């Protein structure tokens, strides 16, 4: 199966979901868990797609509110990062604060529940939009990191791979004056820090002097074709699709709902608030993720 890769891009204004007067009340976990257990009983072999909502209980913020809108400024764009030195200075400067939040995060009950679903053979493949590696730390084995991993850095010139901690340490050594800043952390190793970054010294590739970039798919970049192909082949072999903790506001995740609909596969979503696929799914659960999964596992 060969598919054309798609750029990661924000949900456009013309595609936004209609506004509501107030967010809906979440479904009680007891009810949501029972309904999800019924879905899994009927469709026992699932592709599970996860998003930022799975990691918020681990202290990693998400980007969007319950209506799918931005909670904070949109993330860095790939082309801007590659073309503007000032953008790289700002990104790596903020990462001195933001990266340790991801590095030191620990799996929460939602990660553990999803790993348990795999152990019980209900998860054929876990496709995650998150870059924090927490699913693996929780014990999940069949994991596809759709957008890459934040703990790795790649040279955009020679392709050298480095550990994020090593690059972080070099940036800290080059910029001791920036270590005194504090700010709220943001998703994906960023931070809400607004200072003058013009004097920040960015660590370049130690081999060729090229641009170092986290080995993740930034907005405006392409998801590698082989990852998309593997995920779609797994989806086609499954009984259904379960989306957990994602608003599906970017096409890289929403595409799997489109394909599931085209292939006649049942779909369920477990997420606080609305998702882009609300009109496509067979079961929508607006509920607490960890609590719902606990009830589901006890009911299977």
Image (cartoon, grey):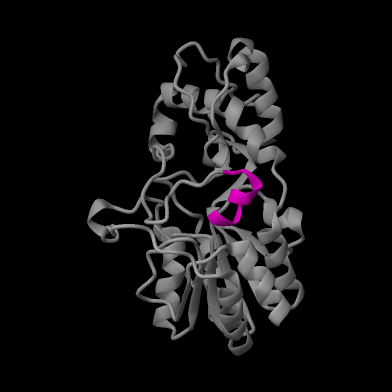
- Whether 18 is drawn above or below 69: the answer is below
Observer able to see residue 5: no
The percent coordinates of residue 212 (x first, y second) are 56, 31
- Whether 104 is drawn above or below 209: the answer is below
The percent coordinates of residue 46 (x first, y second) are 60, 77
In the image, what residue occupies the spot 75% across and 57% down? 138
In the image, what residue occupies the spot 63% across and 14% down? 174
Which is nearer the eye, 234 or 127? 127
In the image, what residue occupies the spot 71% across and 29% down? 166
Observer able to see residue 42: yes
Q: Check if residue 12 falls in the magenta segment.
A: no
Spot the residue most to the bottom.
42
The percent coordinates of residue 194 (x first, y second) are 44, 21
Which is nearer the eye, 13 or 262? 13
What is the count of numbered marks? 0
Which is nearer the eye, 133 or 280? 280
Q: Check if residue 59 falls in the magenta segment.
A: yes
Residue 252 placement: quadrant? bottom left
Residue stretch in magenta: 53-60
Compared across the picture, whether 64 is left or right of 169 comes to left
Compared across the picture, whether 57 is left or right of 93 comes to right
Quadrant for the C terminus, please.
bottom right
Spot the residue most to the left.
14
In the image, what residue occupies the spot 60% across and 25% down? 96
Residue 105 placement: quadrant? top right
Q: Magenta stretch mostly in which secondary structure?
A: helix
The percent coordinates of residue 17 (x first, y second) are 29, 61
Which is nearer the eye, 228 or 112? 112
């Amino acid at each position: 199966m060969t598919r054309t890769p798609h750029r990661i891009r924000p949900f456009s204004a013309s595609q936004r979901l209609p506004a509501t007067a107030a967010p809906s009340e979440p479904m009680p976990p007891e009810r949501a868990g029972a309904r999800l257990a019924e879905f899994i009983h009927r469709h026992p072999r699932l592709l599970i797609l996860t998003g930022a909502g799975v990691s918020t209980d681990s202290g990693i913020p998400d980007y969007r509110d319950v209506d799918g809108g931005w909670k904070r400024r949109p993330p860095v764009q790939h082309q801007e990062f590659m073309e503007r030195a000032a953008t790289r200075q700002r990104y790596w400067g903020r990462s001195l604060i933001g990266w340790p939040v991801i590095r030191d995060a620990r799996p929460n009950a939602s990660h553990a529940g999803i790993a348990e679903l795999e152990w019980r053979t209900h998860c054929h493949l876990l496709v995650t939009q998150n870059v924090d590696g927490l699913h693996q730390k929780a014990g999940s084995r069949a994991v596809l990191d759709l957008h890459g991993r934040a703990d790795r850095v790649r040279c955009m010139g020679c392709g050298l791979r480095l550990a994020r901690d090593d690059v972080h340490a070099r940036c800290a050594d080059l910029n001791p004056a920036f270590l005194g800043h504090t700010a709220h952390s943001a998703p994906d190793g960023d931070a809400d820090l607004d200072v003058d970054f013009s004097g920040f010294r960015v660590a370049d590739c130690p081999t060729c002097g090229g641009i170092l970039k986290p080995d993740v798919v930034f907005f405006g970049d392409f998801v590698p074709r082989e990852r998309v192909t593997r995920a779609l082949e797994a989806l086609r072999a499954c009984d259904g699709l379960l989306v957990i903790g994602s608003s599906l506001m970017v096409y890289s995740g929403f595409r799997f709902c489109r394909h599931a609909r085209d292939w006649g596969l049942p779909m369920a979503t477990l997420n606080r608030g609305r998702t882009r696929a609300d009109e496509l799914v067979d079961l929508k659960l607006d509920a607490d993720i960890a609590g719902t999964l606990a009830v589901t596992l006890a009911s299977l």
